[in-house]
Image (cartoon, grey):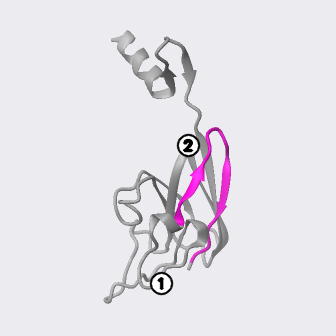
């Protein structure tokens, strides 16, 4: 049992090459600064997507949240492998953990997307909001609420 657990830990944090060498998987951290939070009510919630088919309302790859801070709120994603991603976030003022919409389907809570893509009649495509995470690099994105 101990041997099985040790192998599981190695496989989740290391890559074993064909020649038997073990190397660490290099992941990155991602800091999100939301500079225009209107109030300290509720939370700011962010969803990180790694699939164009899922963005922005499908299966979330990773999510995070922070207590809203009037003015600027900072969120952080840890252990993000290199690749292409897109972020959708919103200010969950009422704390119900979901984006709220009015009777015609328009958001009633403020939201934003990576690359500060503006939503017009619908949410942007993954291709508009995507950005690249590089291996072992800590990056910072500023996403404004709409």
Question: Is the C-beta separation of discs 1 and 2 under 8 Å?
Answer: no
Q: Earlier in the sequence, mark 1 or mark 2?
A: 2
- Inspect the magenta stretch and tell me whether residue 17 lies in it: no
- Inspect the magenta stretch and tell me whether residue 144 lies in it: yes
Residue 43 visible, this angle: no
Q: Which residues are magenta?
A: 129-145
Q: Is residue 24 above or below residue 63?
A: above
Question: The C terminus appears in which quarter of the rendering?
Answer: bottom right
Question: x and y percent of residue 103 in the render?
Answer: 31, 89
The image quadrant of residue 73 is bottom right
Question: The N terminus appears in which quarter of the rendering?
Answer: top left
Q: Which residue is mark 2?
A: 82
Say whether residue 42 is left or right of residue 72. Answer: left
- Which element carries disc 2, helix, strand or loop? loop
Name the residue located 49 percent from the left edge and 11 percent from the top edge: 20
Question: x and y percent of residue 58 in the render?
Answer: 34, 61
Q: Is residue 9 above or below residue 32?
A: above
- Which element carries disc 1, helix, strand or loop? loop
Nearer to me, 113 or 34: 113
Q: Residues within 10 Å of mark 2 (few under 14, many from 20)?
A: some
Q: Is residue 59 above or below residue 11?
A: below
Q: Which mark is residue 95?
A: none
Residue at the farthest bottom position: 104
Q: Is residue 21 above or below residue 79?
A: above
Name the residue located 56 percent from the left edge and 65 percent from the top edge: 114
Question: x and y percent of residue 59 in the render?
Answer: 35, 56
Question: x and y percent of residue 78 in the render?
Answer: 57, 44
Q: For the residues marked 1 and 2, what is the alpha-carbon distance in whole angstroms?
A: 30 Å
Q: Which residue is mark 1?
A: 120
Nearer to me, 92 or 137: 137
């Amino acid at each position: 049992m101990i041997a099985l657990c040790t192998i599981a830990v190695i496989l989740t944090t290391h890559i074993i090459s064909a020649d038997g060498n073990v190397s660490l998987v290099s992941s990155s951290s991602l800091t999100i600064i939301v500079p225009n939070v209107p109030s300290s009510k509720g939370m700011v919630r962010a969803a990180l997507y790694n699939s164009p088919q899922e963005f922005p309302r499908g299966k979330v790859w990773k999510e995070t949240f922070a207590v809203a801070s009037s003015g600027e709120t900072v969120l952080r994603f840890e252990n993000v492998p290199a690749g292409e991603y897109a972020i959708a976030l919103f200010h969950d003022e009422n704390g119900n953990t979901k984006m709220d919409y009015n009777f015609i389907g328009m958001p009633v809570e403020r939201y934003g997307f990576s690359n500060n893509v503006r939503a017009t009649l619908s949410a942007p495509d993954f291709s508009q909001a995507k950005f690249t995470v590089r291996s072992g690099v800590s990056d910072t994105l500023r996403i404004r609420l709409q």
